[in-house]
Image (cartoon, coloured by chain):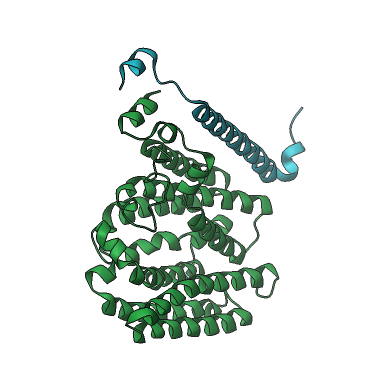
Amino acid sequence: MTDISTSRTDGLTASAAVHGALRDYLLLLKPRVMSLAVFTALAGLVAAPGEIHPLMGFVALVFIALGAGAAGALNMWYDADIDGVMSRTAMRPIPRNRVPPDEALTLGLVLAGGSVFCLGVLINWVAAGLLAFTIAYYFVIYTMWLKRRTPQNIVIGGAAGAFPPMIGWAAATGTVSLDSILLFAIIFLWTPAHFWALALNRSRDYERAGVPMLPVVAGKDATRTQILIYSVLTALAGIAPAITGLGGKLYLVTSALTGAAFVALALSVYIRREGHASDKAARSLFTYSIFYLFMLFAILLAEHALGLVS
Amino acid sequence: MTENSDTHGVVLTAEEKRRRRIRSLVIALSLGAIAILFFLVTIIRLGSNVANRPL
């Protein structure tokens, strides 16, 4: 009963402060981020050499998803103050008083510990170690340390979102290899261009919350230059699996074409700097960047699942 | 804290009780699912050896 009385003294409304609805707890796990983590982990799992029993693969994905959800809940617990200030995040469960903060923290810690332990016992400890590192990296390095201190928050913190394919790979093989590092590199280099395209149109939000995103600190022009640089690097990294043999011919063609379009859209953001056209260009790049990443991993997944590459 | 809650504790509303019941049910089902997963993974790991035990 302690949590109940504590929550009530926090001044939260009675119906919201005691227990959230199931939907609120699910929202704490950031389902969209979780789905991206599961999808890229699945690609890593399937693209890895050797075979894994389908049920073992399923189990690995379940606990990778729960680990990603744990990181999301811990992030929402720590960032509740700034989430309430920004329009994009103001509807999250804690700022809306739908879930008490201490319950979000408990959920995050239990899921983090539980997912790492179960992944280690049921699959292997290399994958579990990577999952533990990912959760700690996202929560401690990104959320607690970098996010409010440096405009490079997304660049360095982006590593957390890049680990899932590596964890999937490790779940299947028990190792980390060059190819799995390449999958990591694609998402790592993709993240800045993806988030800065969003931040260009949300800079006032971040400014109000005191988050030093690049457009706020260095200005929009400097951000456009950085977006272009990272888009080129992402497109190059995207082709790399075809060179090492991880991706086949279909992957080579897809990554080259979609990568070229990625750079073209980034160039459009770089050129269009004023008014509605500028906002539209940034929105287009943001939307396309999601499609780009999905296509790369979907093709990789399909090629390996269909046996088009060994 | 009100005087009422000091003497009688917090009284949950019907909606709060419903939410707590659902949450408890989900936790129970999740634990059950994990137990089943552990069992199935053990069977898969043992493979054909699952039937190979001294009587």
In the picture, which quadrant includes the N terminus of chain A? top left
Q: Is residue A140 above or below residue A44?
A: above
Asked whether residue B25 appears in the rendered view, the answer is yes
Front-lying residue, B19 or A73 = B19
Say which colour chain A has: green
Q: Nearer the viewer, residue B5 or B51?
A: B5
Residue A104 falls in image quadrant? top left
Residue A293 in percent (x, y) is at 51, 71
Q: Viewed as shown, does residue A293 lie left or right of A103?
A: right
Question: Does residue A167 appear in this view?
Answer: no
Which residue is pictured at 72% across the width and 45% down the height?
B47
Horizontal side of residue A309 vs A111, given as left or right: right
Q: Position of residue A35 (x, y in %)?
A: 54, 57
Which residue is depicted at the point 41% across and 81% down?
A: A266
Residue B42, quarter of picture: top right
Q: Residue A54 location in percent, x, y?
A: 68, 54
Residue at (27, 57) in percent of width and height? A209
Residue A147 picture location, percent across and down: 29, 58
For chain B, the rendered hue is: cyan
State the image quarter where residue B3 is shown: top left
Q: How many marks?
A: 0
Nearer to me, A217 or A278: A278
Q: Is residue A93 above or below residue A258?
A: above
In this rendering, position of residue A149 left or right of residue A140: left
Quadrant of image for the C terminus of chain A = bottom right
| Front residue of this view, candidates A113 and B30 | B30
Q: Residue at x 42, y 39 (%)?
A: A99
Q: Residue at the top extreme? A: B7
